[in-house]
Amino acid sequence: MRTQDAVAKDYYGILGVSRDATDDDIKRAYRKLARKYHPDVNPEPEAQEKFKEINTAYEVLTDDRKRQIVDLGGDPYAPGGGAGAGPAGPGAGPFVGFQDIMDAFFGAGTTGTTRPPRSRTRSGADAILRVDLDLAETAFGVEAPVTVDTAVVCTGCNGAGTAPGTQPASCEACAGQGQVQSVQRTFLGQVVSSRPCVACQGTGTTIPHPCSTCAGDGRVRNRRSLTVKIPAGVEDGMRIRLAGQGEVGPGGGPPGDLYVEIHERPHDIFSRKGDDLHCRVTVPMTAAALGTRLTIKALDSEEQVEVKPGTQPGSTLRLRGRGVPHLRGTGRGDLFVHLDVRTPTKLDAESERRLREFARARGEEVAQLSKQGGFFSRMRDAFNGH
């Protein structure tokens, strides 16, 4: 009985990109997903597995040889799942993929045209970390301690992936070439094509005795502490790049970068728009009419604000240079104080009498409500002849 071949993983689907995606498209998709599923951001148990899955997909699609295997229908990590396992592999019939035919006629995969084995050491991926800060910290800067969970060089093998006292061995499947050749019949005749060796993943070497710590990968996951210097004036959503603090690559390759994304917590008093700050202050009706002086506590100082006589509800006072420092350049934004004029809801008899005298002195007629009814009640009584 013939068993069904294992289905190759859809690495493009894992990252949510099309098969013709560019390297930049793949990188953007990876960063978006890494930000969502990174263990430091998403504590859900499924997030860790998802994070590993998208890391693997990113690693495959950014490696030319592994991506070629995927494009030919194979899976570079499946046992026996190289390009030969896909629909264009050996035994797939008299026809091969269009890429194989192009390689044969233009020299990319013909006999005598081989590429050198790829390095087992490759660059690592970038990592993203979220940091929550208060308004004063984003305004004036701070040194923030953070904890990062990334791949680091394995100390057991220093990134070599081999057990102590052992060395990588030449791959027997490809004789150390990193590629294997196959002859296939097509409607154009016989085609000789070259593909990355599945046994060694195109490196030309294997590790017979892998390191017990990292299982031959040359890296392990580790939680470490860093101090990030946050400059004054950063805004919510900005990212700070820490070069070389990201994921170490396979084989102990150079690390990627770490991006620290700023999230600013809401403030109890101030709201922020760019480098300007806004707040609301309530003043009594009499203070707005007669004028007064207010003490406003800004982020780093106390300011005296003059409310001029006759100030109307909704008026705004501007304090120049009392906002957030500019991230690039000198100077600061402004602080805008929005005034809410408060009208008293209850008056005692004496206060009401004086307020009516004030209204009469200004020629302002104010209808007086009686205990028997208001203005509309009196109109109704007059209409009914009472």
Image (cartoon, rainbow, N blue to C red):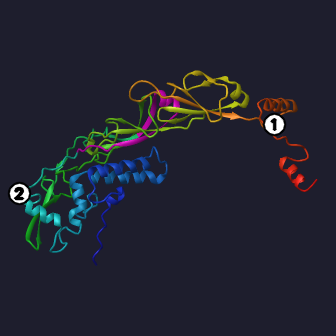
- Horizontal relation, residue 225 to residue 86: left or right: right
Give the percent coordinates (x, y) of residue 233: 45, 30
Which of these two is toward me, 193 or 212? 193
Q: Residues within 10 Å of mark 1 (few under 14, many from 20)?
A: few
Give the percent coordinates (x, y) of residue 115: 12, 52
Q: Mark 1 or 2, which is nearer the eye?
A: 1
> Amino acid type of disc 1?
Lys
Instruction: Please tell me which residue is depicted at 35% across the width and 55% down the height of the picture.
Output: 15
Which of these two is toward me, 41 or 92? 41
Q: Disc 1 designates what residue?
A: 346
As drawn, which residue projects farthest toward the left? 112
> Amino acid type of disc 2?
Gly
Give the percent coordinates (x, y) of residue 136: 52, 29
Q: Would you place residue 58 above or below residue 349 in this image?
A: below
Q: Which of the numbered marks, if any, corresponds to residue 112? A: 2
- Magenta segment, which residues? 121-148
